[in-house]
Image: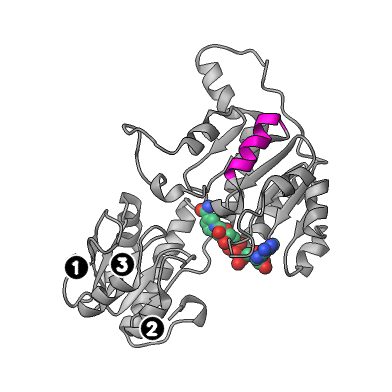
């Protein structure tokens, strides 16, 4: 039976992968630690695959060790692959597969949840009524209906987000390198990036982080936005210059900020740090604002998405183990 070693494995990874490992086709080993040079040697000789997540580091050094152990596949249980040296994998003849898409609605719905929480202050109301404080002072929100929403990136997730916003009765403006005809037919209007920024009450980011769009939201682009605008980022932390957005929050130029991703998240997210001193003053400052909501990269975290991630990852591995070629969309090397 071929063996798969999971790194950065959480209890939910174990639950979903065990459930979908039909007929116990693979031997599964779950390790909590990240994969990096410190642990690569612990992979047993003859292991068929390692299964990794966003914060595992597959440098050429790590990949060389895996190759020595006879590992044949690196299976990413996520879409992004910036943490894997694909050239090194190619050089050592290790195949690399991923899950290019899983439940875009999960992420889009979380973006909406963040927006509604910030706007209608349900997080404050929840605590308030538990203390028998039924006052409404400070809970004033705004109607979503009739507001102008800007969407940057109208791929799978951005598209799902646009559809929800249209359902709310919002006017939706979008910017993408490619325009989607179906969305246009539904009423989404594409325009230039700056025009979106100028016009919107709420901006939601759904494009990938690339070398060209790092700090897409910075002091110059924030200055173009309307005073009192809201920003939601469920995409990648590096799209926002956190220092600049903090300045804009301090002046009130940005009224609400909801982030599920953060540029320095690697040191924080997916860990229970409740008993630790956090040295990152920027995230501490962000979390001190009453009009900022931070969640720890949980937008994807639904039953449907985790089921799809487990099924697609195991499906990729079944095929590669059987010597079959999976769909090109899941294969990186
Ligand atoms: P996708 O590839 O389907 O869509 C991305 C869209 O962005 C495409 O239409 C592309 O043309 C557009 N785009 C690329 N560069 C752009 C730019 N500079 N400006 C404007 N548009 C640009 O991807 P997706 O599945 O919709 O995912 C979007 C992003 O969501 C991912 O890149 C990832 O960073 C993030 N994500 C977050 C979570 C989470 O849990 N928070 C989970 C999955 C994905």
Q: Quadrant of the C terminus?
A: bottom left
Q: Is residue 288 above or below residue 242?
A: above
Q: Nearer the viewer, residue 265 or 308?
A: 265
**What colouring method underlies this structural image?**
one colour
The residue positioned 57% from the left and 12% from the top of the image is 133
Q: Is residue 45 above or below residue 185?
A: below
Q: Nearer the viewer, residue 292 or 252?
A: 252
Q: Quadrant of the N terminus?
A: bottom left
Q: Is residue 220 magenta?
A: no
The main secondary structure of the magenta stretch is helix
Front of the two marks 1 and 3 = 1
Cα separation, mark 1 vs mark 3, equals 26 Å
**Neighbourhood count class around disc 3 (C-alpha, 10 Å): few under 14, some 14–19, many 20 upward:** some
Dot 1 or dot 3: first in sequence order is 3
Cα separation, mark 3 vs mark 2, equals 27 Å
Residue on which the image places disc 1: 41
SS under mark 2:
helix
Q: Is residue 155 above or below residue 286?
A: below
Residue on which the image places disc 2: 90
Dot 3 or dot 2: first in sequence order is 3
Disc 1 + disc 3, Cβ < 8 Å = no
Cα separation, mark 1 vs mark 2, equals 20 Å
Q: Is residue 331 left or right of residue 201?
A: left
Q: Which residues are magenta?
A: 242-252
């Amino acid at each position: 039976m071929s063996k798969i070693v999971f790194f950065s494995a959480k209890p939910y990874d174990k639950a979903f992968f065990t459930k979908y490992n039909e007929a116990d086709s693979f031997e599964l080993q779950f390790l909590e630690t990240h994969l990096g040079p410190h642990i690569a040697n612990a992979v047993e000789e003859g292991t068929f695959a390692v299964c990794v997540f966003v914060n595992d580091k597959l440098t050429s050094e790590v990949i060389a060790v895996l190759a020595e152990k006879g590992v044949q596949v690196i299976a990413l249980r996520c879409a992004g692959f910036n943490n894997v040296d694909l050239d090194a994998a190619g050089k050592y003849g290790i195949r690399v597969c991923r899950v290019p898409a899983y439940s875009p609605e999960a992420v889009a719905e979380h973006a909406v949840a963040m927006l509604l929480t910030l706007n209608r202050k349900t997080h404050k109301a929840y605590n308030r009524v538990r203390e028998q404080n039924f006052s409404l002072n400070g809970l004033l929100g705004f109607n979503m209906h009739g507001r102008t929403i800007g969407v940057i990136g109208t791929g799978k997730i951005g598209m799902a987000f646009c559809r929800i916003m249209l359902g709310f009765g919002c006017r939706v403006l979008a910017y993408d390198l490619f325009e989607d005809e179906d969305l246009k037919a539904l009423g989404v209007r594409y325009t230039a990036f700056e025009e979106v920024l100028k016009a919107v009450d709420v901006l939601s980011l759904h494009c990938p982080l690339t070398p060209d769009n790092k700090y897409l939201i910075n002091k110059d682009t924030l200055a173009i936005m309307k005073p009192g605008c809201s920003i939601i980022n469920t995409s990648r932390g590096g799209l926002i210059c956190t220092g600049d957005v903090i300045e804009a929050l301090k002046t009130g130029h940005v009224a609400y900020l909801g982030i599920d991703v953060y540029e320095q998240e690697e040191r924080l997210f997916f860990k229970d740090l409740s008993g630790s001193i956090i040295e990152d003053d920027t995230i501490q400052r962000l979390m001190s604002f009453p009009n900022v909501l931070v969640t720890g990269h949980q937008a994807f975290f639904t039953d449907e998405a985790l089921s799809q991630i487990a099924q697609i990852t195991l499906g990729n591995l079944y095929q590669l183990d059987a010597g079959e070629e999976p769909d090109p969309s899941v294969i990186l090397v």
